[in-house]
Image (tube, coloured by chain):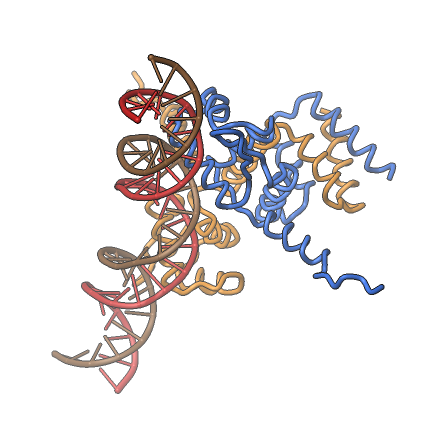
Chain colours: A blue, B orange, C red, D brown
DNA sequence: ATCGCACGATTACAAATGTAATCAACGCGC
DNA sequence: GCGCGTTGATTACATTTGTAATCGTGCGAT
């Protein structure tokens, strides 16, 4: 029995990944994402409450940001009675990577070492940081 | 003989540093800065030429960016006959630090180690990168 | 059945940003 | 001396972002 013809799954997935990777989240929007990454799903008023601790935003400001994120496809909404519960679609991981890769590429030629060197010169690295780095490097060497 | 009364130099310097640190340079503007950081001073047409290799910008676009940087105080201009030669005022170092500190603070709780860990999971670190990191860590430990 | 309120949706608006075209002045070659 | 081209200055305009206010609608209490 011939398999059902199907569009190439890999390609479709890749499209999704690409579109998520290229999703551009503004600074303000990322604050909303962080709240949802921390706990999900959450209703609008919960998000507002969570954000009220760090940002001096009106409720409607947060609503706007939620809507922009919906439009961008970074989050989605599940109906829950009269209201919605919001889930992140964009994964924090993916976003983190794109953000840091972007910075590294633009400022440090894509290499991690120069960034670390930069901080070792300009920013106090604590004893703990150094120990942690040592651990990481040791582990990397083993593989 | 009493010293000439003077305004507090330290404070004035600090003001300057602060203002430079808080200077906000857009992505497009930073491309112009990179050109000037690479070689300085340069005339507008040299900057245009240098940028033509990486960006598909019209001459007037670059001129606009140069003007915005002047207005922001990130660069200055020295007259040279009929034209100007531009110098960076904002130091690459300072900018680099502010950019990377910002990213680290927002995404990794201000710690370098988690960023490195992130890359060690998600991005191939080459043998060389690892060796380099090891060197850096070793040197850090010595102090 | 009605009124108010809780929520999401729509509209608002200034500033920053990306990307240019056009204007104006002035020195150089003819 | 004069027109032209080079170069900086001014103006333009759409989009994104920050930050809200207002609108519309349907559920729940009375």
Relative to B95, is A52 above or below?
above
Side of A70 relative to A116 (left or right): left
Number of marks in the rendered image: 0
Residue B52 visible (yes or no): yes
Residue D19 rendering spot, x and y as whole percentages: 36, 32
Q: Looking at the image, which residue is at 50% across and 40% down?
A: B95
Closer-to-camera residue (A49/B84) = A49
Report if residue B1 is visible in the image. Answer: no
Image: A94 above or below C20: above
Quadrant for residue C4, please give it.
top left
> Residue C5 appears at what percent x and percent y?
35, 20
Horizontal and vertical percent for residue B24? 42, 40
Quadrant location of the C terminus of chain B in the rendered image: top right
Q: Residue at x 84, y 37 (%)?
A: A141
Quadrant in the rendering for residue C30: bottom left
- Residue B120 in the figure: left or right of residue B29: right
State left or right for residue B35 relative to residue A21. Answer: left
Q: Classify residue A118 as left or right of residue B119.
A: left
């Amino acid at each position: 029995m011939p398999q059902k013809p199907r569009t190439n799954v890999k390609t479709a997935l890749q499209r999704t990944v690409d579109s998520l990777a290229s999703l551009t989240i503004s600074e303000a929007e990322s604050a909303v994402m962080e709240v949802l990454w921390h706990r999900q799903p959450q209703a609008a008023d919960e998000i507002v409450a969570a954000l009220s601790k760090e940002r001096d935003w009106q409720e409607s400001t947060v609503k706007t940001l939620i809507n922009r994120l919906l439009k961008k496809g970074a989050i989605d909404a599940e109906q829950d009675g009269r209201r919605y519960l919001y889930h992140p679609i964009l994964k924090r991981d993916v976003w983190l990577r794109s953000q840091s890769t972007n910075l590294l590429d633009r400022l440090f030629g894509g290499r991690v070492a120069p960034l670390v060197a930069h901080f070792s010169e300009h920013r106090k690295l604590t004893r703990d940081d150094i120990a942690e780095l040592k651990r990481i490097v040791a582990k990397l060497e083993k593989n």
